[in-house]
Image: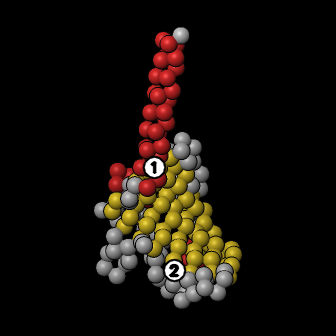
Amino acid sequence: SAQGFGSQALEDLELRRHTLSFLLLLTFLVTASPVSAKKRVRDLFGLTIGMREESVHKKLKKIATQQKEEKEKEEEGEQEVWSLKKDDRFDYILTRFNRDHRLTLITVVARPNRVRYSDVAETKEATVASDGRNYSYRWKVERDGRQPGYLLIARGSSSEFLTSYSLYPAK
């Protein structure tokens, strides 16, 4: 009947509208530009993007034990894994250096259910994305004096506690 066809067409239209709304929301969450973190981000064990490798090692040897060092392709530099000695909140730190021996990436891995996203930076200022199982909080931290700007991304499978967070040079 014509009435039955009209009802089905309305249901199809409504489903398409919901699907489009979901895709637009997902696109916004994935592409939203990060906001600047006004408050200083949690101290990163004295490490900053752009720091010389010798200075990084000097700081880390006081609080951690080097577990692994990997040389990457010549143009990419090297990556290291450091196990923290006496930290009940964080387990280890991963560092990456460029071919000029400058720090280009810091990833800090947290122990389970110990570190909240809000412990890292102000969550109200973050761009948040989630697929319902994984969460990502993203902050763009502006240049501060000699400290270059960087991108901070905290990730986890909990909406409250992070698994890790990383610092990348701002692009």
Residue placed furthest toward the front = 2
Q: Read off the residue under disc 1.
A: 27
Q: Which mark is residue 103?
A: 2
Q: Earlier in the sequence, mark 2 or mark 1?
A: 1
Q: Residues within 10 Å of mark 2 (few under 14, many from 20)?
A: many
Task: Name the element at disc 1.
Answer: helix
Label 1 sits on what residue type? Thr
Residue 24 location, x and y as percent? 43, 44
Position of 145 with respect to 94 (left or right) is left
Residue 36 location, x and y as percent? 33, 62
Residue 83 in the image: above or below residue 59? above
* Residue 48 visible in the shown view: yes
Label 2 sits on what residue type? Leu
Position of 167 with respect to 110 (left or right) is left
Q: Residue at x 47, y 82 (%)?
A: 51
Residue 79 location, x and y as percent? 62, 77
Q: How is the image coloured?
A: secondary structure
Residue 162 in the image: above or below residue 105? above
Q: Residue at x 57, y 43 (%)?
A: 133
Q: Quadrant of residue 119?
A: bottom left
Q: Residue at x 45, y 49 (%)?
A: 27
Q: Quadrant of residue 164?
A: bottom right
Residue 122 in the image: above or below residue 131? below
Q: Which mark is residue 38?
A: none
Residue 110 location, x and y as percent? 56, 58
* Residue 57 visible in the shown view: no
Q: The C terminus appears in which quarter of the rendering? A: bottom left
